[in-house]
Image (cartoon, grey):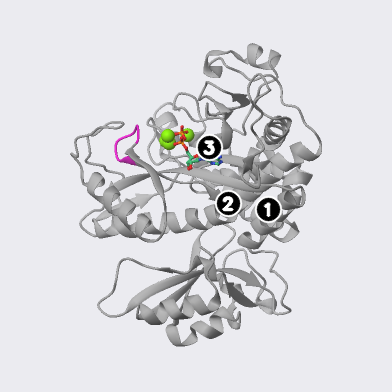
Amino acid sequence: ENLTKEDVLKLARDNDVQFVRLQFTDIFGVLKNVAITVKQLEKALDGELMFDGSSIEGFVRIEESDMYLKPDPSTFVIFPWRPQEGAVARLICDVYNPDGTPFSGCPRCTLKRVVAEAEELGYSVNVGPEAEFFLFMVDERGLPTTITHDKAGYFDLTPVDLGENARRDMVIALQDIGFEVEASHHEVAPGQHEIDFKYDDALTTADKIATFKFVVRTIAQRHGLHATFMPKPIFGIPGSGMHTHVSLFQGNENVFFDANDKRELSETAYHFIGGLLKHARSFCAITNPTINSYKRLVSGFEAPVYVAWSEKNRSPLLRIPARRGVGTRVEVRNPDPAANPYLALAVIIKAGIDGIKNKIMPPEPTDKNIYDLDAKERNELGIDNLPADLIEAVQELQGSKVVREALGEHLYKRFVDAKIMEWDKYRSQVHDWELQEYLTKF
Ligand code: ADP
Ligand code: MG
Ligand code: MG
Ligand code: MG
Ligand code: MG
């Protein structure tokens, strides 16, 4: 929806909005809110509201801390859950420097820049995500546990758990604020759910992913549950991914489709796939940004471990779903919902575009189950592994000009520094697994 400043002011008046949350994300994709009263709304829409950026992780040094929030009027949403009086709305913002230029640490501005690069080539980018999450019980003090009481399996129709009720309310709330929910189901693991919404242009989808996580958490809380987008909360059962479907359009035409090709894929599609495969190891730190992310990327749970593509199989990094025509798309299967949606889409699009610009042809698709191949067979087919852990992923990122360019220097540096610190904290810890393994053995 294309709302103007005037539309937003009118909607706020007509719906008795009292408070507006100005939202943006830090480099880790954590949603930040600056709450204002409706009296300040006009000033905010004019981009005149300042905040102290030094209080936000990964933003700026103290001495250059004044930042401006520029709300995007088309993101105006009135929350369906109402307080006693009045209503609460939100606007998603870009972050600007005092001199009126986009702040280089703003993830939303970063995605806009990469999308503009695709537009220069004549393409609009469409993205549809499949975000998975767990719903856990909270204990008597209200703290989250990793206990789930549901016994329903994949697509189970009997609503035997609290999770079903919560998920239904999530879908209703999402629809209320303009999401077109295409699918919503119980996932493979106990307590695990997925809600899919219709694809949209990349920026709108990134906004929607940020909003989605916030709505899911809010509704879960109202049902006395804790929703988590942590990629692998429990060892031995599937983790939560966020498969990301991408296609390029020119007008109403999907340019990945070519009826004359043996796979009905265009040259542009092949090049996009080639770029994704080439840069996958380097963008993994962004699409899979936590220590825990790499505990999901192991064999045995339909999560990708290898850099390959397929039309049939769900084990490689990329799958080309069977749909052709306007539905022709690439499914990128490694991202997880802990990723900053703006940065994850930025690096994926950048990688694909680099493939187009440099006409990178992918190798033949792998239609075997890669998990069944041994290292030698994979080697012969030129199939690489995804990074095994966060530090390997960060090192790959450090070696990549293309991904670094997608992020921009400021974001790149802050991100790498923060992730190296995270790794150092983790590796100096003594974990339960080590005690179980070594305490009595040595
Ligand atoms: P899966 O088969 O992996 O479960 P789905 O068929 O459920 O995938 O589709 C997942 C996502 O793909 C949805 O968000 C859907 O809107 C999106 N999608 C469909 N067509 C396109 C397209 N042309 N470009 C990008 N995303 C698309
Ligand atoms: Mg799905
Ligand atoms: Mg599906
Ligand atoms: Mg799924
Ligand atoms: Mg999928």
* Main secondary structure found in the magenta portion: loop
Q: Which amino acid type is marked by label 3?
A: Tyr
- Say whether disc 1 or disc 3 marks the residue closer to the N-terminus: 1
Q: Residues within 10 Å of mark 2 (few under 14, many from 20)?
A: some
Q: CA distance from mark 1 to mark 2?
A: 9 Å
The quadrant holding residue 63 is bottom right
> Residue 402 in the image: x percent, y percent?
76, 45
**248 vs 112, nearest the viewer:** 248
The quadrant holding residue 85 is bottom left
Q: Residues within 10 Å of mark 3 (few under 14, many from 20)?
A: many
> Residue 246 in the image: x percent, y percent?
59, 41
Q: Residues within 10 Å of mark 1 (few under 14, many from 20)?
A: many
Q: CA distance from mark 1 to mark 3?
A: 28 Å
- Identify the mark at residue 294; answer none if there is no mark: 3
**Residue at figure coordinates x 67%, y 37% from the top left:** 255
Q: Secondary structure at mark 3?
A: helix
Q: Is residue 373 left or right of residue 167?
A: right
- Say whether disc 2 or disc 3 marks the residue closer to the N-terminus: 2
> Residue 210 in the image: x percent, y percent?
48, 57
Magenta stretch contains residue 356:
no
Residue range corresponding to the magenta coloring? 187-192
Q: Which residue is mark 1?
A: 115
Q: Which amino acid type is marked by label 2?
A: Asp
Q: Tell me if label 1 and label 2 are in contact, CB under 8 Å.
A: yes
Q: Which residue is mark 2?
A: 201
